[in-house]
Amino acid sequence: MQENQELLTTAEAAALLRLQPQTLASWRSAGRYNLKYVRMGKKIFYRRADLIAWVSAREATQVS
């Protein structure tokens, strides 16, 4: 598996995004953001590449 396709637990994904795991769980249950995840049984995983793409899509530049 390529590094960017690595599956991260909710705790690992939250640490990467500098969020609390509960924040990701809340967003997931509310459908607040289009943040992709993988469900395997009762376990939830996030692909590193999806997290990076999600953050990149939120980049903003300041306009004067």
Image (cartoon, helix red, strand yellow):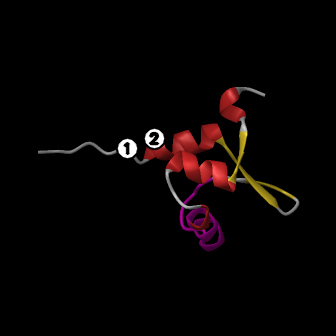
Q: Which residues are magenta?
A: 23-35
Kindly identify the amino acid type of the residue bearing the numbered disc 1.
Answer: Glu
The percent coordinates of residue 58 (x first, y second) are 41, 48
The percent coordinates of residue 46 (x first, y second) are 68, 48
Q: Quadrant of residue 16?
A: top right
In the displayed structure, would residue 30 be above or below residue 55?
below
Left or right relative to 41: residue 1: left
The residue furthest left is 64
Residue picked out by circle 2: 56
Identify the disc placed on residue 33.
none
As for residue 58 lying within the magenta part, the answer is: no
Label 1 crowd (10 A; few <14 / some 14-19 / many >=20): few
Main secondary structure of the magenta stretch: helix
The quarter of the rendered structure image containing the C terminus is: top left
Give me the C-alpha separation between circle 1 and circle 2.
5 Å
Left or right relative to 60: residue 20: right
Left or right relative to 29: residue 7: right
Give the secondary structure at mark 2.
Answer: helix
In the displayed structure, would residue 24 be above or below residue 61?
below
Marks 1 and 2 in Cβ contact (< 8 Å)? yes
Residue in the picture at 60% in, 71% down:
26
Camera-side residue: 50 or 17? 17
The residue furthest bottom is 30
Residue picked out by circle 1: 59
Kindly identify the amino acid type of the residue bearing the numbered disc 2.
Answer: Ser
The residue furthest top is 2
